[in-house]
Amino acid sequence: MRKMSNRGNFMILVNTKFDAGSIVVHDISNPQNLRFGIRNDTNSHFAQWFYFQLSNVRGQELNLSLEGLDKTAYPDGWDGYNVCASYDNQNWFRIDSSFANNTLSWSLTPECNSIYFAYFEPYSYARHLELIGFANECENVQHQIIGQTAEGRNLDLLIIGNPKAERKVWITARQHPGESMAEWFMEGLIYRLCDEQDAVSINLLKNHVFYLVPNMNPDGAYHGNLRTNTTGTNLNREWLTPSIDKSPEVYHTRNKMLETGVDIFFDIHGDEALPFVFTSGCEDNPSFSTKQNALQQQFEELFPLINPDYQTKVGYPKGHFSSESATVGTKWVGNQFDCLAYTLEMPFKDNANLPNDLYGWNGERSSLLGASLLTMLNLLR
Ligand code: ZN
């Protein structure tokens, strides 16, 4: 298919040849009716992520649509969702979008020659390397490569603080690579934890050591997958029996956890459908203990006071993961280590309690949430 359309001397061009770029072009012959679809994750049936650039569009009235969304992983994700756009690939804003007949539609007249659209504010592999590079130079940080992915990317672990500290805190993010807000969250948390003038971080590091995996799925992220690595594996269903071939990311992380022990665990995600920040704990585990219950209660009382973006009224119903529960990272960790273990979910849409029409939920708010988790941990007894 030619990814161009004729309009006088100008041709609209579609570009996805960059980190996480992904779109299927259906028809771009008419700027009033530019039609696209969503590509499946590598070797998988999951589909939801998109990220593409349109060029030669300045001053043209454009009507765009994403079609066939009943075939995506989360059809409920599109109702009430507004597309993310950027002219410079750095500053992202939302465009009012409408959803009907399994199609998401939006219109605009671009102010510049090129414009990007994405499912959520991307977090690039280049930015990941900068984050690791920053931490690598900090005095309090050990950077370890605990393994490599199927495509040979490093699986980066940052150990912040003294490994002999009383409390071992593990935080993993982006098992689902299209949930880029999870790495924005880690960025906010890591920069704060490395700030030698931040009293919360200084105090925390007296008796906590942090084991942080900012990107569990760099292959999937690079290829623009929503949910799987490039072997087509959903890493968050691999924790009971990870495989060195299909899920090396989980295999290596889990081994390291067994070596260090875990007292507190967070696995950071994004939720396509629910417009809220929420957590999912271990209460469905048969092994759920009174200790875990007391820690969860403490967390759920305090964190909404520290960061009102977090709430406990809306979340997953009991039994959400059903028969797959034991294979989910948080459930496995909670069961294995009898510790506080949470999946933390941020919205792709917005926080409906504190909505922002221009940005929706975005990278900045995710980073601030990540930084505020440290205040929470500083209070946890
Ligand atoms: Zn997820």
Image: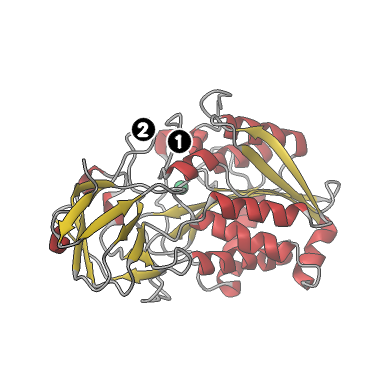
- The N terminus appears in which quarter of the rendering? top left
Disc 2 element = loop
Compare residues 154 and 116 and report the one nearer the observer: 116
Q: Residue at x 40, y 45 (%)?
A: 226
Q: CA distance from mark 2 to mark 1?
A: 9 Å
Please say if 326 is above or below 67: above
Task: Check the image and name the residue furthest to the front.
Answer: 9
Mark 2 Cα within 10 Å, few/some/many (few <14, many 20+)?
some
- Between label 2 and label 1, give the one nearer the viewer: 2
Marks 2 and 1 close (CB-CB < 8 Å): yes
Per the image, the residue denoted by label 1 is 234
x, y percent for residue 170:
68, 48
Residue 33 higher or lower than 91, as above or below: above
The location of residue 13, given as percent across then percent down, is 28, 55
Q: Residues within 10 Å of mark 1 (few under 14, many from 20)?
A: many
Residue receiving disc 2: 44
Left or right, 173 with reference to 165: left
